[in-house]
């Protein structure tokens, strides 16, 4: 006994095909409904009008007139419905063809994006506001993913650079001590301690910024006068500024009676990072000013310098991990390179923000910390 497999109807593939099939079904249902109504309702109404006009019931003329009406109605309605069906099908086919092209472009770009080709973009589709909005949203997402990928690659490259120097120094001293070329004296101990501390500080900073960005940073919040925060930061960095010959000024004229609810140690860490950054980029004889004030329901702390300044691109990437605005890698060796990133994460954890402004190169910079007022 043989069995035959039942035939399965092939469903139309693709959104355009399904739309065309759906439109066709709707048109067929409309045509059948119109034909059924014309067949059931029309003849009785026409029969009643003929009787009212004086024709006798079941007369030959009445039967002939009704047959003529029925045939004319079926031919005219059927022809009109067929033409309408063909015209509507053609319009639906045209519209689905117009939809298929932009949808295929978006699908192709999505496939390229899933393969790691983050430069893929959707061209201007020109097929309506909704598809244009979808294309813009897709391109914006792709641009953000491309930026994240570039940042990740640059971060790995810069992290390798940060690790290379201390590891190379430790390796050289290890080989020298093993070969007894170098003696373990005060100088070698100091060099080994410095490089070990540098690696430790780098690991701690990476852990801290990751913790802050993930929202797991523990804060010990207390009410603190804003003036106290400014003076603490000023006192902590004053000697460093004097050593380099940079003027450090403090402006507390607008900070009287301003109180913020913050983790004092964390906010001090932000201000120390900002002052150290300004000191690094301000030449001897320059001036750095730390000031505070109130902006509506927020309290602001601003560190302003007249040093190197920043370009538009540098402002865009100022708070990225390990970002270097110059290719010479001239950063101070004492820093891990993510001080600004940590500072921004701490400000965000307090419900505030950290922003940077600069008119341009050699025109100074300003970093502003915004915190909610008590």
Image: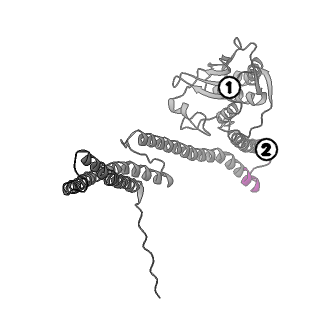
Q: In this view, does 335 lie above or below 90?
A: above
Residue 129 is left or right of residue 291, and the answer is left
Q: Which residue is drawn at 64% across and 48% down?
A: 164
> Is residue 128 a member of the stretch shown in magenta?
no
Q: Which residue is drawn at 38% across and 52% down?
A: 26
Residue 38 is left or right of residue 205, and the answer is left
Q: Which residue is drawn at 21% across and 56% down?
A: 59
The mark nearer the N terminus, 2 or 1, is 2
Residue 330 is left or right of residue 187, and the answer is left
Q: In this view, does 367 lie above or below 78?
A: above
Which percent across, then down, holds residue 334? 69, 36
> Is residue 177 a member of the stretch shown in magenta?
yes
Magenta region: 173-190
The foreground one among 115 and 105 is: 105
Residue at the spot of label 1:
275
The foreground one among 262 and 162 is: 262
**Which numbered tag is attached to residue 189?**
2
């Amino acid at each position: 006994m043989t069995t035959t497999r039942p035939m399965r109807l092939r469903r139309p593939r693709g959104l355009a095909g399904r739309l065309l099939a759906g439109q066709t079904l709707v048109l067929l249902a409309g045509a059948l409904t119109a034909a059924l109504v014309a067949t059931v309702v029309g003849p009785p109404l026409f029969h009643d009008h003929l009787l009212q006009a004086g024709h006798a019931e079941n007369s030959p003329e009445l039967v002939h007139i009704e047959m003529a009406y029925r045939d004319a109605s079926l031919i005219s309605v059927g022809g009109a419905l067929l033409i309408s069906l063909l015209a509507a099908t053609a319009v639906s086919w045209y519209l689905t063809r117009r939809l298929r092209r932009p949808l295929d472009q978006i699908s192709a770009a999505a496939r390229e994006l899933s393969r790691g080709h983050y430069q893929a973009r959707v061209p201007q589709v020109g097929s309506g506001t909704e598809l244009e909005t979808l294309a813009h949203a897709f391109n914006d997402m792709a641009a953000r993913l491309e930026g994240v990928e570039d940042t990740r690659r640059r971060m790995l490259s810069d992290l390798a650079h940060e690790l290379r120097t201390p590891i190379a120094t430790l390796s050289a001293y290890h080989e020298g001590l093993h070969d007894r070329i170098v003696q373990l004296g005060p100088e070698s101990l100091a060099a080994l301690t410095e490089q070990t501390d540098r690696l430790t500080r780098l690991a701690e900073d990476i852990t801290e910024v990751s913790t802050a960005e993930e929202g797991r940073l523990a804060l010990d919040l207390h009410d603190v006068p804003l003036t106290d925060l400014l003076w603490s930061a000023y006192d902590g960095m004053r000697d460093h500024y004097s050593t380099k010959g940079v003027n450090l000024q403090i402006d507390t004229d607008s900070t009287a009676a301003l109180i913020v609810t913050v983790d004092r140690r964390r906010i001090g860490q932000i201000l120390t990072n900002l002052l150290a950054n300004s000191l690094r980029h301000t030449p001897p004889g320059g001036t750095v000013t730390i000031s505070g004030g109130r902006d509506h329901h927020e309290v602001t702390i601003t560190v302003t310098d007249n040093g190197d300044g920043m370009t538009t691109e540098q402002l865009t990437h100022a708070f990225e991990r390990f970002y270097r605005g110059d290719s010479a890698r001239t950063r101070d060796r004492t820093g891990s390179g993510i001080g600004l990133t940590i500072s921004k994460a701490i400000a965000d954890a307090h419900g505030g923000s950290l922003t940077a402004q600069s008119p341009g190169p050699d025109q100074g910079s300003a970093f502003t910390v915004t915190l909610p007022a008590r």
